[in-house]
Each structure stands twice: as C-alpha cells, then as structure tokens.
Image: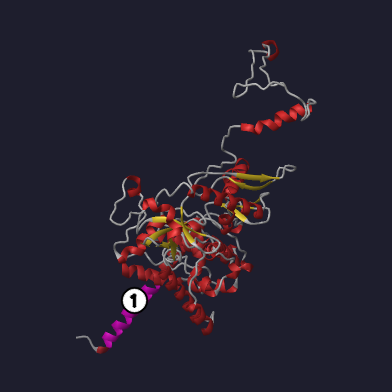
Amino acid sequence: MKTKKSQKSWLKKAFKWLTIAGVCGAGAAVSLGLVVFSVVYYQLPPIDALTQYRPKVPLRVYTADGDLIGEFGEERRDYVPFDEIPRHVKLAILAAEDNGFYEHSGIEFMGIARAALANLITGRRGQGGSTITMQVARNFFLSSERSYTRKLYEVALAFKIEQNLTKDKIFEVYANQIFLGHRSYGFGSAAKTYFGKDLRDLSISEAAVLAGLPVAPSAYNPLVNMRRATMRRNYVLGRMFNLGYIDEITYASAMAQPIEVRQSTAEQQKTQLQTQELHAGYIAELARMLLLPYFKDTIYNQGLNVYTTIRSRDQLVASNTVRQNMIEYDRRYGYRGVEGYADLSQEETKEANIRLALSKVISSSNLLPGVVTSLTPKLMTVQLYNGETVTVDAKGFAFAQRFIAQKGKTLKGRYKEKELKVGAVVRVTQDSKGKWSLGQIPAVESAFISANFNTGAIYSLVGGFDFKINQFNHVTQAWRQPGSSFKPFIYSAALDKGFTPATVINDAPLSIDPRLTGGKLWEPRNDDHKYDGP
C-alpha cells in the first residue's frame, strides 16, 4: 500500500509535469500563432486605399443659385472630415460599436474571445467581435464571407492599419465609408437620407439612430421598421448613459424624443427635396450626358460639382406653371380610372397591404398616391403611404363619377376594370388652401424653355411632366413640324435683300425654269391653290 506521503509526492510530480506541459503547450500555441500571424501579415495587400483615402463621392448638379437638382452615383456620400464630426455623433458611434477604440491597438481580444465562445455554444458564426479598425479592414479589403481564416486576415489587417494611420484618421475613414442603408455611405449622407439634415445639426437621439445602423442597416432602418429602429436607438442611448457619455437628464430627454424621418415614401427618398420642387430631373440628366464623354464612368465617383445656368426661381415658376396647366387640361377630358387595388378585407393585414400597393406606385410631387379606405356619395377618405388620412369632398372627385358604381347598378367594361371603390389606389392633390381633390398623371406632355438670347444661357427648362415617370425630354429630343417658325428666316432674308414691310408682292402663279434651279421645273403653290394677285 502506498503511504499518504508517497501519494502527495506523486501528486506533486503530476502537477509539476502537467504545469510544465501546459506552459510548453501554451508557448507552442503562441509561437505557432505568431508564425502563422507573421506569414499572414507579410501576405497582406498594401493599404494605399486607406493612406490615400479617396471616397467615392457622386456627381452633383446645381442651379446657378446653388440648389441641388441632381445626384448621380452608386453610393450616396457626403464626406465629413474628423474635425467636423460633432462630438455627440462620435460618442454615439463609439458607444454602439467600439467604446475601447482609443485604448486598444485595433484588436479587442476579449471581444473576439467572447464572440468565439458564443459561436461555439450556438454552433453559428453570428458573433463577430470586430473593432472599428477591423470593420475598416473588412470593408476595404475582405469579402463578406464568415470564416476563421477571414477573421485571421481581418485581425492582421487591423494591426497593419493601426501601424500606419492615426486613431482619428481610422475613425474618419470608418465614419465616411460604412454602409447605412438606402444607398447611403457614411454618416454625413445618412443624416440627409433619414433626417434631411447636415450631420452637425443632428440631435443626440438622431445620432443614436444612425449609430445603431451599421450592425444591420436593413433591420434597424427607420424608414422600413420604426419599432426596431426605436429599440436599437434606445440601446445606443443606454450605452452612452452607462459609459458616462451623457447625463441622466440628456438620456431621458433623448429617450422621449420621437424619431421623425424626413421622407414619407420610399420613392420620395430617391430624390433630393430641391429636385422635387424644381422638377429639374431633365436638366440634371442633360448635364450628366454632356459630361459623360469627357469623364467616362469616373464621373460617378470623383465628387464633381456641376453648376448650370438654371435660375431656381425661373425654374420653379416654369415647372409649376407647365405642370398645373397639364393637370387642368387633362382633367377636362375626364378620369381614366384607378391605378390598382389593395386588399383591405382583413383588418390585421390592412396596413401592410396598403404599404405594399403604394410601394409599387411612383410618387409625383403634389400628386400623392393613396388607397381609398371609405367612399360615400359625398366623401372619400384616402390613406397615404405615411399613414396620414386625407378627405376629398364630392366636388373633389366629381369628374370620376363614371367609375363609381351607383346604388343597385354594376359597372361594365373598362369602367368596371378600373372602378373607384374602397381599396382602390388613386392619386390626390392639395391646393393652396389645403383642400384635397382626386388627381391623375396627365396623359399629355408639354415642354418649356427660357433662355438669354444674347448669351445662350438657359434659365429654365421643363422637358415633360415628370422625369421619374417619363425620361423623354420634349425640349431636346422631340421632333416637330416647322409650321410658321420658318417665316422669320424668310422675312429676314427678304429685308436683307432690300424688301420692306410695304413692298408689294405679286401673289400669282410662278414657274422657275430648270436652268435657274439647276434641276427640275419649280412651281411653288399656295396651300389653298388660290392666288390674290398684286
């Protein structure tokens, strides 16, 4: 039998050897890790894209007064230097993404360990544990693949980035490069996309909304899912409070503030406010086409700002006048029917079906799409995309009576196919007095141009009713019969030859010999084949 003393001795030896084995194993693992890291590190691509960072900034077209009328590019981006990013926006980003950013060396090992453990327990690779520097590395140099190999390259790249860029520069690159939904890259662009503001004008609540987007822009987008956007904002605000970035009063005030997004429909989101008011899509497209031969595809990412000769006031008056006259002219010829239907039979799916139906309709400035939720002989109620309900009195939809089934009667033919009833997708417009009426996109087109005949500068140009609906420019692309427009040229030539307004012209049949024409006999005739003589 072994004595207690010998057992203790054996345990000590076992513990000793296990400790030695553990230390050796750990040392070997660290050594192997360093070797692998070194191999990976020297295989990394150069990071010139960061040290010489040139973000893709879209082509922007302006009026002579400086109003934005068009933007072209795959990525919406308003570049904001680090020093111009507001402090509360920086703090919101740090709270949401990486509060230890200014302390670590680009890699937060505890975060990676926690993510690895969570992935091991769940069996899924959902946790990332990425710092801001690692996200910059991923966005510039790596694919979206989720693998341990990619994570290793991400760590190595983060280390290399930290060796070559300052913390502030890394943060600046991140804040201008990250995708935040709706084609918006960077916080400067997202501020305008979601709130219609410059970054410097955001409230703490709005900054928290944007700071919560990088993890999942589609899920926490306030234009798509307000409930989840609010939950995410509240999480970011809670982080800011717990980290001591904001005090309790500021926290409570921001939590109580409702999220008010700038756009009410997805289609309105696609166009800047100034463009909608001035209806200058045709002008912006002309500018793009004129520049394209010189800059090719690089035109969309060089950040070119193009200033036209268009005067904002002239363009506003021209576009509004042309559009209003087209609407009134078209209205005189009657209603042509509704644009579709939404199923409102089930209360629980009613709102979703209204949004689905309206998402398929292109908005056109003051002709807003909506769904009829109730209809009586005297009143029609219409719900817009943003949930707002408007009412139209009998006079406002009187011109559509042919499409409304009277009591005890059934419509037939095209009137039945496009019947105005509950669930119908229609358009409504509001006049200067706030009164709503039924409307429709005109079936006719018109055009207008004004210019300075001394310089050739174009002050206003209306190529059609709405560029979003019809891109054909009726000023520059339409062919027209000359009509009487040739007469000034003929009269000018006559004056140049010595004729005066008092010169008598013999209106008689005329034949010009082929020897003078150099070809066939020419016998010009009056349109009515009558001649009045001298």
Assess whether residue 184 is covered by the magenta stretch: no
Relative placement, left or right, of 118 versus 70 is left
Query: Please, which colouring scheme is shown?
Result: secondary structure
What crowding class fits label 1: few (fewer than 14 Cα within 10 Å), some (14-19), or many (20 or more)? few
Question: Which quarter of the figure has residue 91?
Answer: bottom right
Quadrant position of the N terminus in the picture: bottom left
Which range of residues does the magenta coloring cover? 5-24
The main secondary structure of the magenta stretch is helix
Query: What x and y, as percent, mark residue 170?
Result: 57, 65
Question: Which quarter of the figure has residue 246?
Answer: bottom right
Q: Which residue appears at 47% of the width and 69% of the height?
A: 212
Query: What x and y, as percent, mark residue 420?
Result: 37, 54
Asked whether residue 38 appears in the rendered view, the answer is no
Quadrant position of the C terminus in the picture: top right
Relative placement, left or right, of 299 versus 534 is left
Query: What x and y, as percent, mark residue 268?
Result: 50, 58
Element class at badge 1: helix
Instruction: Give the farthest residue toward the bottom.
Output: 4
Question: Which quarter of the figure has residue 385?
Answer: bottom left
Residue under label 1, please give it. 18
Question: Which of these two is toward me, 340 or 9?
Answer: 340
Query: What x and y, as percent, mark residue 280?
Result: 59, 51
Question: Which of these two is toward me, 519 or 414?
Answer: 414
Question: Which of these two is toward me, 345 or 24?
Answer: 345
- At label 1, the amino acid type is Leu
Relative placement, left or right, of 284 versus 496 is left
